[in-house]
Amino acid sequence: MSTAKANEARAKTIIKNLEKRNMEGVYCASKEDALKQALSYIEKGSSVSWGGSMSIEEIGLIDAVKAGDYQVIDRSIAKNYDEQREIFSKIVLSDYFLMSSNAVTLDGELINIDGTGNRVGPLCYGPKHVIMIVGMNKVVSNAEDGIARVRNIATPPNCIRLGLETPCSITGRCADCYGDTCICSDIVVTRRQSAAMRGRIKVILVGESLGY
């Protein structure tokens, strides 16, 4: 009970600080509530895509979108690099982009690290709407802690999941590597959303542990 109340208190703080950064936030206590909330944002018939994320899979959002009345843009069907580029061009112009955040600070900053930029790119610009599913396990004090969290907590299991032999997949901690299999190429701290795109980014904070 005390953990749930603490999560809710932290979420209120984050939501207030997201607002001053021209982003929207909402707190859902469970994965089920988070799924309902996310779907309530997405208009029927709209184009929807997503970035690599265990969190959106864990709440059932990808399955719900695939089964729903939406124009699905699925990057996983690409057979080669040229097809990936073609699909990415459609993602950039999509109505909704679904993802998680590798970390979120109590002050409302979003921290994300990406291998090729295909996830952080649409976060920064392109799709009309970005919907984030973020478990409260990803809350950190500041951006520096967020980057450290991603490198040492999130990236090692991600590399193992993807079958990549990186220093962190072997030792469990970041080695600041530059190898061909490194997935920490782009570090993006979203400090705010421009006023012209106020409310474009919606962060659904979930009172459960989701993703890495």
Image (cartoon, rainbow, N blue to C red):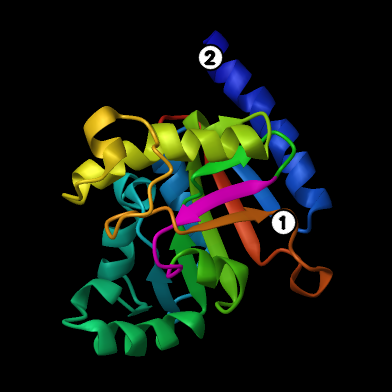
Mark 1: few/some/many CA within 10 Å (<14, 14-19, 20+): many
Q: Quadrant of the C terminus?
A: top left
State the separation of the CA atoms marked 2 and 1: 26 Å
Q: For residue 95: magenta?
A: no
Residue 210 seen in this snapshot: no
Q: Residue at coordinates 49% horizontally, 81% vertically from top-left? A: 92
Above or below residue 10? Residue 200 is below
The quadrant in which residue 63 appears is bottom left
User: How many discs mark residues in the rendered view?
Assistant: 2
Looking at this view, is 130 or 190 the one in front? Answer: 190
**Residue type indicated by callout 1:** Met
In the rendered image, residue 197, in percent from the top left (x then y), is placed at: 74, 72
Secondary structure beneath label 1: loop
Q: Residue at coordinates 33% horizontally, 78% vertically from top-left? A: 72
Q: Residue at coordinates 83% horizontally, 69% vertically from top-left? A: 195
Q: For residue 114: magenta?
A: yes
In the rendered image, residue 9, in percent from the top left (x then y), is placed at: 68, 24
Read off the magenta span.
109-118
The quadrant in which residue 6 appears is top right
In the rendered image, residue 162, in percent from the top left (x then y), is placed at: 20, 51
**Residue type indicated by callout 2:** Thr
Looking at the image, tell me whether mark 2 or mark 1 is earlier in sequence order.
2
Residue 100 seen in this snapshot: yes
Above or below residue 80? Residue 191 is above
Looking at the image, the residue that sits furthest to the top is 2
Q: Which residue is mark 2?
A: 3
Q: Which residue is mark 1?
A: 23
In the rendered image, residue 108, in percent from the top left (x then y), is placed at: 71, 43
Looking at the image, the residue that sits furthest to the front is 178
Q: Residue at coordinates 40% horizontally, 36% vertically from top-left? A: 174
Above or below residue 120? Residue 190 is above
Secondary structure beneath label 2: helix
